[in-house]
Amino acid sequence: PARDEIALTDVLHALSDPIRLDLVRRLAECGEERPCGSFDLPIAKSTATHHWRVLRESGVVAAREEGTKKFNRLRRADLDARFPGLLDSILAHA
């Protein structure tokens, strides 16, 4: 969604799952985009795909495709502009 269309309830829902919260924390720590497959997750690939879709549709991450890979990046600037301090607060307590 566009920055102005990111809904607080969607963001909170996306971050309420421990797997998705961990993915966001890892993206925040590295500070750059990463391919989906670069995350070692204890779940099936189809489940990981679901989690990435929830994060994208909520506006927490953005993705771009390059060949057969999908690269994800945290939409920190958009989230900070829309909900100042929210992401930092959640990540600090995760």
Image: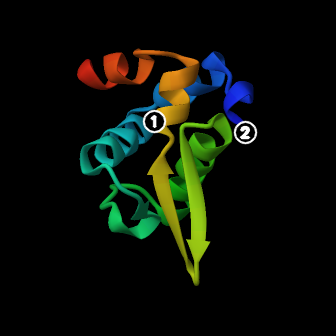
- Residue 32 in picture, x, y percent from top left: 35, 55
The residue depicted at 41 percent of the width and 69 percent of the height is 37
> Which residue is labeled 2 in the image?
1
- Element assignment for label 1: helix
The residue depicted at 61 percent of the width and 46 percent of the height is 56
State whether residue 34 appears in this view. Answer: yes
In the rendered image, the quadrant that contains the N terminus is top right
- Residue 36 in picture, x, y percent from top left: 45, 63
Name the kind of residue labelled 2 in the image: Pro
The residue depicted at 58 percent of the width and 20 percent of the height is 82
- Relative to the observer, which residue lies in front, 40 or 61? 61
Side (left or right) of 22 relative to 20:
left
The image quadrant of residue 35 is bottom left
| Numbered tag placed on residue 76 in the rendering | 1
- Relative to the observer, which residue lies in front, 60 or 23? 60
Q: Is residue 28 above or below residue 85?
A: below
**Label 2: how many Cα within 10 Å (few below 14, some 14–19, many 20+):** few
Number of numbered markers: 2
| Marked residue nearer the N-terminal end (2 or 1) | 2
- Residue 77 in picture, x, y percent from top left: 48, 34
The residue depicted at 53 percent of the width and 45 percent of the height is 61
- Relative to the observer, which residue lies in front, 42 or 92? 92
**Label 1: how many Cα within 10 Å (few below 14, some 14–19, many 20+):** some
